[in-house]
Image (tube, rainbow, N blue to C red):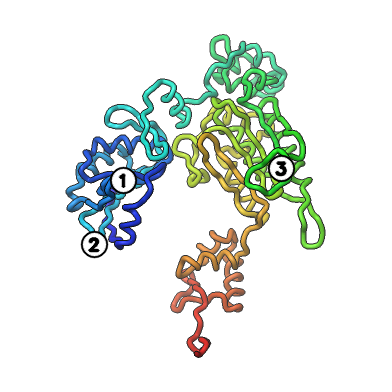
Amino acid sequence: MTISVQTISKAQADKIRLIDEGQFSDLKAAELLPSKLTKAMSAFANADGGELYIGISDKERHWQGFANVEAANAHIQTFEEFFPLGTDCQIEFLKCEALQGLVMHVQLGKTQGISKASDGIPYIRRGAQSLPVNTPDKLKRLELNKGITSFENETAPVSKDVIITSEITIRFVETVVPNTEPEPWLKKQRLLRDENATVAGVLLFAGEPQAILPKRCGTKIYRYKTREAEGFRDALAFDPKTIEGCLYDQIKQAVLVTTEIVESIPRMGEETLETIKYPPEALHEIITNAMLHRDYSIADDIHIRIFDNRVEVQSPGRLPAHITPKNILDERFARNGQIVRILNKFPEPPNKDVGEGLNTAFSAMHSLGLREPIIQERDNSVLVIIRHEPLASPEQAILEYLDSHETIKNKTARAVTHVRADYQMKAVFGRMVEKGQIEQVPNTRTNSTAYRKKKKDEAEEPTA
């Protein structure tokens, strides 16, 4: 674990001293025993991650850090033992010339497994508190949230015959190679347990899963004639539509109905009213992702809300394991692994490119010049917002980037503008240079060519 010492200003130190302790931050005194820190460490790791500042008294908010890095060795060792791989924990020390000692700044990530404190109890962060997970029910909920256990493997309150004899199963088994009978195949896939079907088996192969698992596996679609942040009854265009059936059918029907409603919304174009268009794969992938990865232990439906300026897809349950809104496009974790795997065996599976769903949706939005979706994690659900708003022009995106950076190069510019080709980006730079918006940084060329905002010549400055 590489540890650095960063020098900060008095103003920056004061900002840290007065930080609000809450869901993502906590202050601890340097005198606190390392073993006492593990409660906060466990709580952050089992929730959304967060930041610890060690060397600031809780009540008086005095900056009273460690004399030197070596004085914090016991604390460092505790963190290294707690996060042996080092990937979920970064440590640095903060130094302010006007204040005494070094404050340890620890950034903790959301871990894949359950992290326990030194007392053997896992904790979870709720606001500014580290709460113990000290009952079987609380531990079960944490295991479900982390993806350590999955509700899809639980037995459903229904006989195995409900899925063995269903038309969906019979049609599906006819496509299996080599030929087989429904019951042996379902047992092999672990969709039967003793005389019962599992939750995954019911969701995939029962004719009416919603009758067996009420309020856990339906989809409701709303159309609100408003741009307000929240939908309200008077803005409803019609009673919410309920989509039911097995997952395979439900995904197709939900995508179809959502697309039809969206394309019925008029929007003023350059000359006349026109319909709103989303790339079909974006709606398909986001709705499919919601149904595949929701937490089926939570008694709630998936909610698709269609507004005048956006579509919202809300699915029950928080993101599992180490997945966060920031890393969701790069990391992989399937809460419902059986459902994902077996649904992929259906003819023309809705999850054809397993693990690439949201990436495909983001790419499709970019291809039509639309802003990428927003992913929000709420207390007990995940919300994906698909907006009608166009992307900023490449020129605007570059100028916005240069508002906070000195220079920009071709590779970075392509990333922030979503322009794929090198030659296309050069053409954008060329137009901006001609307009006097940017200029080439002197002594940069070929692959190292950089641009910056055009500096005004002294001769151009107005005289008093």
Whether residue 209 is situated above or below residue 84 in the rendered picture: above
Q: Which residue lies at the image location 57% right of the left edge and 46% below the top edge? A: 359
Q: Which mark is residue 27?
A: 1
Label 2, secondary structure: give it: loop
State which tag comes first along the sequence, 3 or 2: 2
**Residue 87 visible in image:** no
The residue singled out by tag 2 in the image is: 98
- Residue toward you, 329 or 122: 122
Residue 75 percent across, percent down from the top left: 23, 42
Name which residue type carries label 3: Tyr
Q: Which residue lies at the image location 40% right of the left edge and 44% below the top edge? A: 24
- Residue toward you, 330 or 156: 156
**Residue 233 located left or right of residue 461:** right
State which tag comes first along the sequence, 2 or 1: 1
Q: Are marks 2 and 1 in contact (CB under 8 Å)?
A: no
Disc 1 to disc 3, C-alpha distance: 44 Å
- Residue toward you, 119 or 158: 119
Q: How many marks?
A: 3
